[in-house]
Every structure is written in structure tokens, then in C-alpha cells.
Amino acid sequence: MKKKLNLLKNEKRKILPVAFTVVLTFITIAGIASSNYGYVDKYFCIGCMTCVDVDSEDFQMNDNSIAFVRHNGEIRDADLFEIAKESCPMDAIHYTF
Ligand code: SF4
């Protein structure tokens, strides 16, 4: 009986790290899939204002005519943000993961 209990304890020691890794991976993937933040790569932005025209709730131009994501990067309109992202001629708009 004592031998069986020891075997069971050993199995638990093996399973726990695996279970922890699986749960951590799931949480990470879920977080990536539901990212609500974005940013403009200022080194690629040419200041064409397309993103602002498409989604003025999420994009604004700074004093140097470079776009940035308003509200500290939090996306307010996911659909328009995606359209603006696809419309950017420099592929300068990205999601934050
Ligand atoms: S669409 Fe792209 S290149 Fe044009 S202002 Fe926006 S981020 Fe910059």
C-alpha cells in the first residue's frame, strides 16, 4: 500500500509541471488572440493620414506628422482599426501582443 502511494506521489510530481505548462500556454494563446492594443511603427509611417481618415477614433497625427494609436494604444473600434491597418501603404500599423 505504501509503495502504491509513493508511486502515486511520483506520478503527481511528473504530471504537475506538464499541466502547469499546458495551462500557461493556453493563457498565453488566449491573450494573443484577444489583443486589444495596437501601435504605429514611427520609423515606417510616412504621414499619409490614411489611417486617421479611416479610423479617427483610434488614430491621430502627432506634431511631427507621424500617426499614433490614441487612448494609449487601446483599440476602440476593432473593425475600423483592421481596415486602417490593411490600408496603410507602409504596413506600419501592428497589434501589440
Ligand atoms: S496609414 Fe500608415 S503611413 Fe499613413 S499615416 Fe497611418 S500609419 Fe502612417
Image (spheres, rainbow, N blue to C red):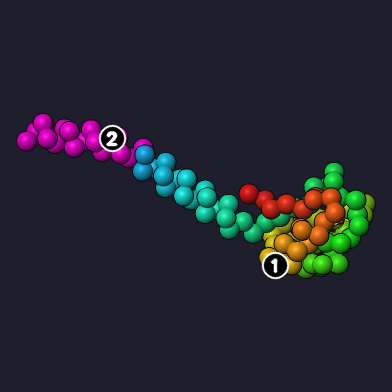
Q: Main secondary structure of the magenta part?
A: helix
For residue 79, the mark is 1
- Magenta run includes residue 20: no
53 to the left or right of 31: right
- List x then y, in percent, for residue 68: 81, 55
- Magenta run includes residue 10: yes
Judging by the rendered image, the residue that carries numbered circle 2 is 13
- List x then y, in percent, for residue 8: 18, 37
Disc 2 is placed on an element classified as helix
Check disc 1 and give the amino acid type.
Asp
- List x then y, in percent, for residue 72: 73, 57
Residue at left offset 87%, top offset 62%: 50
61 to the left or right of 27: right
Residue 82 picture quarter: bottom right
Disc 1 is placed on an element classified as helix
Mark 2 and ligand 1: say if the CB distance to the nearest ligand atom is below 8 Å.
no
Q: Is residue 23 above or below residue 69?
A: above
Nearest to viewer (mark 2 / mark 1): 1
Boundaries of the magenta span? 1-17
- Alpha carbon separation for disc pair 2 and 1: 46 Å
Check disc 2 and give the amino acid type.
Arg
Residue 80 picture quarter: bottom right
Mark 1 and ligand 1: say if the CB distance to the nearest ligand atom is below 8 Å.
no
- List x then y, in percent, for residue 55: 79, 67
50 to the left or right of 74: right
Residue 15 picture quarter: top left
Residue at left offset 63%, top offset 49%: 97
Residue at left offset 85%, top offset 46%: 44
Tell me the quadrant of ligand 1. Answer: bottom right
* Quarter of the picture holding the N terminus: top left
